[in-house]
Image (cartoon, rainbow, N blue to C red):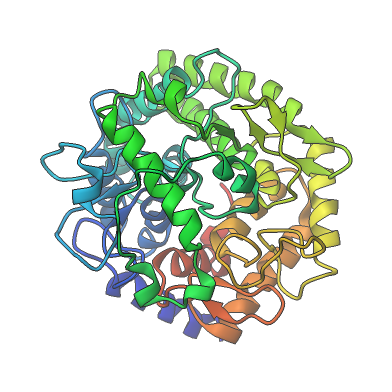
Amino acid sequence: MASDMIGKAQDILRLNDRGTYTVPTAGLYPFQWNWDSCLSALGLAQLDEARAWTEIDTLFAHQWDDGMVPHIVFHQPDDGYFPGPDIWRTGRAIPTTGITQPPVAAFCVRRLFDRAADRDMAAKRARALLPKIHAWHQWFFRCRDPEGTGLVAILHPWESGRDNSVDWDAALDRVPVEGVEPFTRRDTLHANPAHRPTQAQYERFIWLVQCFRDLGWDNTKLHAASPFKMVDPGFNAILIRSCSDLGDLAEDLGAPEIAAQSRAFAARGIDAMDALWSNEAGQYLCHDRAIGALVDSPSVGGLIAAFAPVPPARASAIAARIATLGEAVNFLVPSHDPSVPEFDALRYWRGPAWLIVNYLIADGLSKSGEQEIVERIVRDSVRLIEASGFAEYYDPITAEPCGGGQFTWTAAMVLEFLTERAAAP
């Protein structure tokens, strides 16, 4: 059974390979997405190491001059997706969006490097990426943490990767919709509308895009101008972990200045994360920087925080919290607490389980020694595939497949879970 699943996962990676980059799935997502691409490279490495490095090289070939790495690169025209380049208008020769996504690149590069069979190639490819990834991390702390708190804010829900999370509801309510240009969505043509963000959310998503576009995508201005400024513990944990991993990689490759600054970023971030901890919730919470308050929303963002090297007591509490959630669902990890009224088992990031989230949480908790809950997460992930194939996400109670099918990063995570190379080096 495992060998059949591995073979199917490899077939999906090949199916969605466009030569130098992968698409998440045909139709619904026809371009290169930032964190999808980096995580998918982990699966590609099991087919072709050089091709995996090319995946990340292609993404960073479209890095902006200020260091930002965009969340989508529009390599080829495709009018089946909205919003396309005509909405973003970022002025790039090869169009990109003007916002970013969770910075998993350094984590993925370090993992590719540590596992590489071709050590010379890995050292050459990783050394070329080091300054580019470091410039991205510097951009975050310069442009998204202007007061030097140690934590960065996302300025658009799409940057989080958790587009319609309950975490954003109150903040999105403060985003105006006046002046939003008429638009026609494409996502609901490819996936069940009941599984997707609502029209009201999309109007606010597009208002933010228009706001940033009107500022010429000047990242020195966007933080101050945005009515949506959210400090997401999951996003920050990914950045902290990536800074830590980049520090180790830079030391191995003889780049001591990058190593020192990366480790300083990570250490300061871990200290600052503690302000997001809620004893009552048993997890980290988002902080709404626009109003200076924590967001009382028990989402998976506060559990992804375990991906960073958080204190052992925090990791143990998160493991216990996930175990409690596991009593209410059949498949871990739900993206929102099933006990609260906002939970929606089918709608994108308001309840469904995602294999990439399971992977990040399991990786972090494994490093913290929380092996019992890690084994449950991995077991549930495999069971989801057995029940419903390689979907974008799943109902955590019934395992109903949701969103797109034949999904690249789902396949890549299956390869991570099912092969011996899944173990962290």
In front here: 270 or 251? Answer: 270
Q: In the displayed structure, does residue 366 sit left or right of residue 208?
A: right
Q: Residue at x 49, y 50 (%)?
A: 161
In the rendered image, the vertical position of residue 386 relative to residue 266, given as above or below: below
In front here: 40 or 352? Answer: 352
Q: Residue 231, position in %: x, y?
A: 60, 32
Q: Residue at x 53, y 74 (%)?
A: 194
In front here: 51 or 155? Answer: 155
Q: In the displayed structure, does residue 234 sit left or right of residue 320?
A: left
Q: Quadrant of residue 221?
A: top left
In the rendered image, the vertical position of residue 135 relative to residue 387, given as above or below: above
Q: How many marks?
A: 0
Identify the residue at the far front of this view.
178
Q: In the displayed structure, does residue 136 sit left or right of residue 281?
A: left
Q: Residue 97, position in %: x, y?
A: 28, 44
Q: Residue 183, position in %: x, y?
A: 30, 59
Q: Residue 293, position in %: x, y?
A: 71, 29
Res 128 visible: no
Res 21 visible: yes
In front here: 122 or 260? Answer: 260
Quadrant of image for the N terminus: bottom right
Q: Residue at x 32, y 68 (%)?
A: 186
In the rendered image, the vertical position of residue 100 relative to residue 189, given as above or below: above
Identify the residue at the far right of this view.
280
Identify the residue at the far left of this view.
93
